[in-house]
Structures are given as C-alpha cells and as structure tokens.
C-alpha cells in the first residue's frame, strides 16, 4: 500500500520536515515550534495528501519529548505516527551516509528509513507505532514522574541539611536520629537562628504543631548538650530554609500520591498491578503510567525488555555475561526493582526463588531481575485474562 511519508527531525525551537511519496522526496520545509508552525505543517501535509490521494504516515524522533504537542496533534488528525529509534537511525545514517549533515538531510534520512523499513529485519526496533494512550494513564505518567523529581529534590536537600547540621551543630543528629521527621523539620524551621532553638522553653517547643511531650523531651535533651560551630551565624539560616523547603516538598509529594491513588482505582492496568503483593500505589502508578497500554507489546518478552527484566546475552569465547538492552524504560525499571524488593519479602514462593538465585552466586539485582522475569509472565497473563494476582502455593521452578 502506497503512503505519504513525512519525516520530522525534531529540534528545541524548530523542526525540519521532509515529505516523500512514491516518486521520492516531493517537499521540504522548516517549521517553528508554535501554533503558526503547526498550522503550516498540517496545511502542507494535507495539500500533498489530497493531491496524491494517499494516507499519511508521520515519523519523528523523540515523540513525547521536544515533539510535544506536535506528536499529539498528529494523532488527533488521524495520521499514523511512528517513533523513530534514535540509535537505529544513527546506524542507518552510518550505512547510507550523506556528504553533509543538516537538519533537512536528517529529515530526508527519516523518510528513507521509512521507505526501506519493510525490507529490514529490525523494522519493529527502528520504527515503532505510537499507540493511543488513555488520559488516565497519561495523567499517571505525568504525576508519577513529577513525584519522582520532587523526591529526588527532597533527598538532595536532606543530605545537604544533614551535612550542615553535622558541621555546625554536632550532636543534634545523634540525639534526634531521624532528621526528616515532620516534627524535627518544623522545629528546625521555627527559627532561622538555631542558637535561638537551643534557648526555647519547653512550653514553646510543645506549641509547635506535631510536637508532644515525648518529642519535646527529646529536643530538650539536645538543648542541654547543644554546641555550635563558628559558621552557625550564616549556615543556620540555610538549614532553616532547607527544612522549610523539605516540609513543602513532603506536602506536595503527599498531594501527588493522593491524586495517584484515585487514578490507580480508575486504571484497569494499575488496578491489576496494585493487586500484586509489594506493588503499592506509587509503584503501580509508575509502572502502569510508563507502560501506558499493553497493546504496544506483541509478547511478554517485549514487556520484559521494556521494564528492564530481560538482560541480553553479551558473551564472547569463554566469557559469559549479559548487558542491559537500550530499549529499557529506566523509570519503569526503577519502580519494578523497588516493588520486587518488597514483593520478595512478602510472598514465600518468591522468597524461596530469590534465595535459590542468591545461592547460585547471583547478585541482589540479578536475583531480583530473574524473579522479575517470572513476574512479567504473570503480569502478562493477568492483563490478558483481566484477573488480579493470586499467589500459588508451589515454588517457582528455575
């Protein structure tokens, strides 16, 4: 079937476009990343589609990245959308090298790849159809990614605050132990000068929200032993600011998790995932949001690669080893590994399988991924049969 092939080399502010038909490249132009550029793009593509009476297939790099919202608008127009694998395109350019390198030439190369793809063995790895994903899964993906960013920011601030406390307020961490506790953060942010905190009366300490008699007693114990470094006058306000920011981040993270919990209940995929022991709301939301739809995978093997649970052979001669495939979604893999860490402690059969792999000499991560590969088969079956997780009594075989 003949098609009108449109290659888009995506940039930050401008995109190069090449349109190819049965007779080769018929048109090339550049568009800006704004409404005028998008309107111009669809006007030119529609004109070519009408004149040649051909269905439109658009291939672009980095869909769901700098291509947004153009990729979403392409889908809304009813055009077929292909995500061009950057690595495969780079290899294609090396084989069929052009004398120069420009954005317009790259757009031509995308069209050439789309023309030759049906004759290539690795067509599915080079050009991947972009599936239609429900709004629920799209929200889960956005919310879970934002939550992960806020958590990473919180960890950075917390580590910095701990280092500052250790340098200018020795003994505080030894007395309090858990510096990220809500009452500790409220205490540290109560005054910008930590020396004033050491002089607060017990009644004032108990007036701080979340601090009762027991916690106030622990803080008073620190006051009796409080000593400060020479940098306290300017480092103290930094600690107070970090504590305030961490409190704010905690509130935002909790708010996101509340939203994610509601969306998980509305998502068929995430609801199935959360039924697996160890898969809490956060992990189920992250994995479900990153997958989007199971229709993008032809088999459970493809799902296993995408989630990072299927390392590839990397052997040569007497050396036997593995390597991670490049198609792995790192966010989904991280969520899977976190969930598996909880899962292996809850489910007895999984715990026995994990122990067996450790006894064979595999590392912690290797053993978890081996277990994860089995669990992917279970997840695939759960989705195909729309059935929640149910633990078996017999031990998983190797």
Image (cartoon, rainbow, N blue to C red):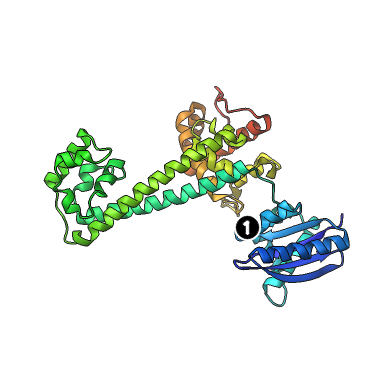
Who is closer to the viewer here, 306 or 120? 306
Question: Residue drawn at (71%, 42%), measured in percent from left and top?
Answer: 298
Residue 307 visible here = no
- Which residue is at 19% across, 60% downward? 233
Out of 347 and 220, give the one closest to the viewer: 220
- The residue that appears at 73% across and 66% down in the rendered structure is 40
Q: What residue sits 29% from the left and 46% below the top?
A: 185
Where is residue 70 shown, x and y percent of the image?
Answer: 67, 59
Q: Residue furthest bottom?
A: 99
Answer with the quarter of the image where residue 296 lies.
top right
Front-most of residues 305 and 32 = 32
Task: Tell me if residue 356 comes above or below residue 85 in the rendering.
Answer: above
Q: Which x, y percent locates residue 151?
A: 42, 48
Asked where in the image residue 72 lies, by quadrant, the reply is bottom right
40 on left or right of 337: right
Residue bearing mark 1: 68
Quadrant containing the C terminus in the rendered view? top right
Query: Within 10 Å of the Cα at label 1, are there few (<14), some (14-19), or many (20+) other Cα atoms?
Result: few
Task: Classify the position of the N terminus by image quarter.
Answer: bottom right
Residue 379 position, x and y percent, is 61, 34
């Amino acid at each position: 079937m003949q098609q009108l092939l449109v290659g888009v080399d995506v940039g930050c502010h401008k995109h190069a476009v090449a349109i190819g038909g049965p007779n080769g490249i018929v048109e090339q132009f550049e568009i800006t990343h704004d409404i005028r550029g998008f309107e111009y793009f669809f006007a030119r593509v529609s004109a070519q589609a009408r004149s040649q009476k051909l269905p439109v297939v658009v291939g672009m790099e980095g869909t769901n990245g700098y291509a947004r919202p153009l990729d979403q608008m392409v889908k809304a127009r009813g055009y077929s959308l292909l995500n061009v694998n950057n690595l495969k395109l780079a290899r294609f350019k090396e084989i069929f090298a052009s004398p120069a390198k420009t954005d317009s030439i790259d757009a031509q190369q995308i069209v050439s790849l789309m023309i030759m793809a049906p004759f290539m063995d690795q067509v599915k790895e080079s050009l991947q159809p972009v599936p239609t994903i429900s709004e629920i899964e799209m929200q889960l993906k956005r919310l879970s990614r934002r939550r992960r960013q806020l958590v990473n920011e919180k960890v950075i601030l917390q580590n910095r605050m701990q280092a500052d406390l250790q340098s200018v307020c020795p003994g505080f961490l030894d007395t309090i132990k858990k510096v990220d506790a809500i009452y500790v953060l409220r205490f540290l942010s109560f005054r910008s000068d930590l020396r004033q905190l050491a002089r607060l009366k017990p009644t004032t300490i108990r007036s701080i929200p979340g601090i009762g008699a027991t916690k106030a007693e622990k803080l008073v114990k620190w006051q009796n032993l409080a000593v400060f470094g020479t940098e306290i006058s300017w480092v103290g306000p930094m600690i107070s600011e970090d504590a305030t920011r961490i409190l704010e981040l905690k509130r935002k993270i909790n708010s996101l998790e509340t939203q994610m919990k509601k969306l998980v209940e509305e998502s068929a995929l995430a609801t199935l995932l959360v039924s697996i022991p160890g898969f809490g709301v956060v992990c189920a939301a992250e994995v479900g949001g990153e997958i989007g739809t199971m229709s993008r995978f032809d088999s459970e093997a493809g799902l296993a690669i995408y989630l990072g649970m299927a390392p590839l052979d990397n052997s040569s001669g007497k050396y036997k080893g593995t390597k991670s495939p490049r198609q792995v979604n790192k966010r989904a893999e991280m969520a899977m590994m976190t969930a598996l860490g909880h899962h292996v402690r809850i489910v007895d059969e999984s715990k026995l399988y994990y122990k067996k792999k450790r006894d064979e000499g595999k590392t912690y991560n290797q053993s978890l991924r081996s277990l994860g590969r089995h669990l992917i088969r279970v997840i695939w079956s759960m989705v195909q049969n729309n059935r929640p997780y149910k633990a078996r009594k017999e031990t998983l075989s190797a």
